[in-house]
Amino acid sequence: MPSQIDWVAVDWGTSNLRAWALDSGGSVVESRSSPEGMGRLTREQYPGVLASLLSDLADPADVLICGMAGARQGWLEAPYLDAPADLTTLERAAVSPEMPGSRLAPRILPGVCQRDIGAEDVMRGEETQLLGLSALLPGFEGLVVMPGTHSKWARLSGTRLERFSTAMTGELFELLRTQSVLRHSFTGDLEGEDREVGFERGIELGIDRPERLTATLFKVRAGALLSDRSSAWCAGFMSGLLIGAEIGGQRDWVPGAGEVPLVGNVSLCALYQQAFARLGMQTRIVDATDATLAGLKAARQG
């Protein structure tokens, strides 16, 4: 890495590790990635993985990390901030793991939690994206939806996270597709032309009757057996049904919402955008990487 690097921003997720070297003006000089996410590491391996990823960084480097490195089973636990939370205080609550023999100086940002009985919830990484969103959309106030393995619905007021809720939509899709009896309906091409047709039907049923999700899901298997539904149709239908049920089941978050930012993978966000359009709602897609990097910059500036 060149000598003009001022600091390094890191997003350490469950599956992957990403790093961006930035100069003093906040411009990205170089980026790196690694498959060495939290799910593959023991606590003792973190220093070596980070040192290897940044091995050609000649100068002492401030390294600011968000994500699962701060989880209880990660590198060093960064205790949660309690919601409602002022996200500008993330950096003040950062923890500093040891890097013996290294010139790197890593700090790990905390996540955010809700402790009220019946409303318990946690996030790690998304809070940094929400801080980044507040920088990308100054003055934003309202509902933010963050599609993903564990989707987050959040109420944001400037840099203040008021409350949030988690939906396990992405993980449910993968578990049902690969480990349930429904897996027998996904033996062909999942990206065929029927997928969009199935997706539209799934969205409709999911939004209209989210309480019937467990019963409606079996239509994936029955449709394949009795109506010769293709694997692509079944994949689209199940995706639409789960996304639709997530949105339909959280209608209480929607009243009064203006344009809703969708923060995440652009392709996945486009599916949610399609679903929200059925409710006549306007949405705006914000790439997760852009939000994460903006959030790490904002956190460091305090």
Image (cartoon, grey):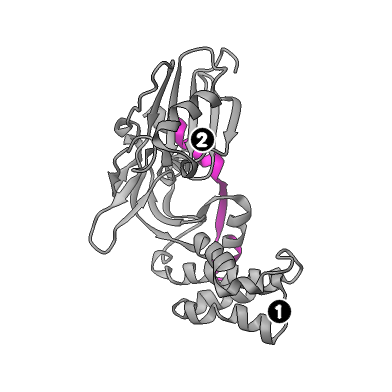
On screen, residue 21 versus residue 113, left or right, reads: right
Q: Nearer the viewer, residue 302 or 91?
A: 91
Q: Earlier in the sequence, mark 1 or mark 2?
A: 1
Query: Which corner quadrant holds the C terminus?
Result: top left
Secondary structure, mark 2, is helix
* Above or below 298: residue 273: below
Instruction: Give the left or right position of residue 11, taking residue 121 as reference.
Output: right
Residue 6 tag number: none
Residue 256 in the image: above or below residue 24: below
Residue for point 50% across, 23% down? 51
Residue 274 image offset from top left, x and y in percent: 61, 64
- Local crowd size for mark 2, using a 10 Å CA cut-off: few (<14), some (14–19), many (≥20): many
What residue is shown at x 35% (from left), y 52% (from top)? 122
Dominant SS type (magenta): helix
Residue beneath disc 1: 229
The answer to which quarter of the image holds residue 179 is bottom right
Q: Which residues are magenta?
A: 273-297
Residue 242 lies, in percent from the top left, at 53, 69
Q: Which residue is mark 2?
A: 293
Question: What's the residue type where badge 2 is placed?
Answer: Leu
Say whether residue 197 is left or right of residue 111.
Answer: right
